[in-house]
Image (tube, helix red, strand yellow):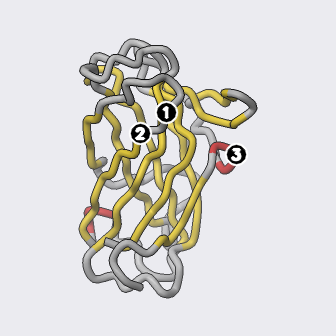
């Protein structure tokens, strides 16, 4: 694969909610989304198999497609955390996500307009050593302690690209 090529795409209906503090399913103009509160860290989880054509040399970029529910002040910020879990040799009775990579971004100044937020991961431990053909999960969390956006953050899609 080449840099920028899409490896995986997830929508809200692909979510495998964690047992606690899960982002909640919602819709906006009949479009499914996952709502993340401003006051509590909430998460969603997606499972996939890393495509066989993943080169495994430079890593991946996770792109979140999200919008503000009510707070469209573009000067406000929303903090996101993303973590990988390679479960090819994992006891499936527990979680073992690698340390999360984080980013802060501003919502669009227009309600209902998507913001694209990118988080990069280097190949290896940064993405829990997920390699081509490995089953994995990716966990997205809105960090309620960071950022000052007051309303919900609505996640519409997540894309993983070759870096």
Q: Name the residue under label 3.
A: 13
Q: In this view, does 100 lie above or below 71?
A: below
Tell me whether the residue at label 1 lies in contact with that at label 2, contact meaning CB atoms closer than 8 angstroms: yes
Residue toward you, 56 or 117: 117
Measured Cα–Cα span from mark 1 to mark 2: 7 Å
Please state the horizontal and vertical placement of residue 84, each as a whole percent of the image. Answer: 40, 57
Q: Is residue 131 above or below residue 140?
A: below
Residue toward you, 137 or 19: 137
Q: Name the residue under label 2.
A: 115
Discs 3/2, front: 2
Measured Cα–Cα span from mark 3 to mark 2: 19 Å
Give the structural element (helix, strand or loop) at label 2. Answer: strand
The image quarter containing residue 47 is bottom right
Q: Is residue 19 above or below residue 2?
A: above
Q: Mark 1 points at which residue?
A: 113
Measured Cα–Cα span from mark 1 to mark 3: 20 Å
């Amino acid at each position: 694969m080449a840099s920028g090529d899409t490896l995986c795409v997830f929508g809200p209906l692909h979510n495998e909610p964690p047992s606690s503090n899960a982002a909640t399913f919602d819709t906006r103009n009949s479009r499914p989304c996952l709502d993340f509160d401003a006051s509590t860290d909430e998460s969603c989880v997606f499972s996939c198999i890393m495509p066989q054509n993943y080169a495994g040399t430079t890593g991946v970029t996770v792109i979140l497609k999200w919008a503000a529910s009510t707070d469209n002040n573009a000067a406000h910020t929303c903090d996101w955390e993303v973590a990988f879990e390679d479960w090819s040799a994992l006891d499936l009775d527990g979680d073992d996500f690698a340390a999360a990579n984080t980013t802060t971004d501003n919502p669009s100044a227009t309600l209902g307009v998507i913001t694209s937020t990118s988080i990069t991961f280097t190949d290896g431990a940064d993405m829990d050593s997920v390699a081509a053909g490995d089953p994995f999960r990716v966990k997205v969390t809105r960090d309620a302690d960071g950022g000052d956006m007051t309303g919900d953050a609505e996640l519409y899609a997540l894309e993983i690209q070759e870096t």
